[in-house]
Amino acid sequence: LERTFSIIKPDATRRNLTGAINAKFEEAGLRVVAQKRIHLTKAQAGVFYSVHAERPFYDELCEFMASEPIVAQVLEGEGAIAKNREVMGATNPSDAAPGTIRAEFAESVGENSVHGSDAPETAAVEIAYFFSGLELV
Ligand code: ATP
Ligand code: MG
């Protein structure tokens, strides 16, 4: 079964939406196989989002991700990477399909409630950044 890396972002943890978001994952057949609440430093958020280092929103994004705790998770299921991105919806909530997490919960294109890996290679790197082998069973 495929695994993907997910983050419940500060705008969502602040509003106590972890359970509602996990319910969406579970309804879609994604199992939460690892999960922890952590408070990233801005530098740690910067490493995680380093692919976006040249984008105009990078600094704001890193500030946001370090503003309050996040929930980091590993989701498992058939076609988990694509399925997770489908359940999340489009990056900008105004473009997100009805019923998706971002359509229902996101506050803006930046504060959009969830992150999900976009490919098998990024999923592997992102899982390894947040979880050790002993935490993954
Ligand atoms: P993620 O990588 O978080 O799963 P994504 O793949 O849908 O989201 P990316 O293009 O990788 O979107 O952007 C990463 C994150 O950067 C977005 O989720 C959002 O929080 C932020 N972001 C993207 N575009 C903008 C923007 N125009 N203004 C502000 N923040 C943005
Ligand atoms: Mg992305």
Image (cartoon, rainbow, N blue to C red):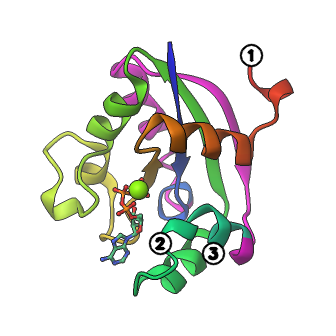
Tell me whether the residue at label 1 lies in contact with that at label 2, contact meaning CB atoms closer than 8 angstroms: no
Q: Which mark is residue 52?
A: 2
Residue count near mark 1 (Cα–Cα under 10 Å), binned few <14, some 14–19, many ≥20: few
Q: Is mark 2 within 8 Å of ligand 1?
A: yes
Residue at the spot of label 1: 137
Q: Position of residue 93 (x, y in %)?
A: 23, 60
72 or 3, nearer to the observer:
3
Q: Secondary structure at mark 2?
A: helix
Name the residue type under label 3: Ser
In the figure, is residue 69 to the left or right of 101?
right
Q: Quadrant of residue 125?
A: top right
Q: Quadrant of residue 34?
A: top right
Kindly identify the residue that appears in the image at 46 percent across and 51 percent down. 115
Q: Position of residue 44 (x, y in %)?
A: 72, 67
Kindly identify the residue that appears in the image at 14 percent across and 59 percent down. 95
Which region is colored magenta?
14-43
Name the residue type under label 1: Val
Kindly identify the residue that appears in the image at 32 percent across and 54 percent down. 105
Residue at the spot of label 3: 67
Q: Position of residue 114 (x, y in %)?
A: 44, 52
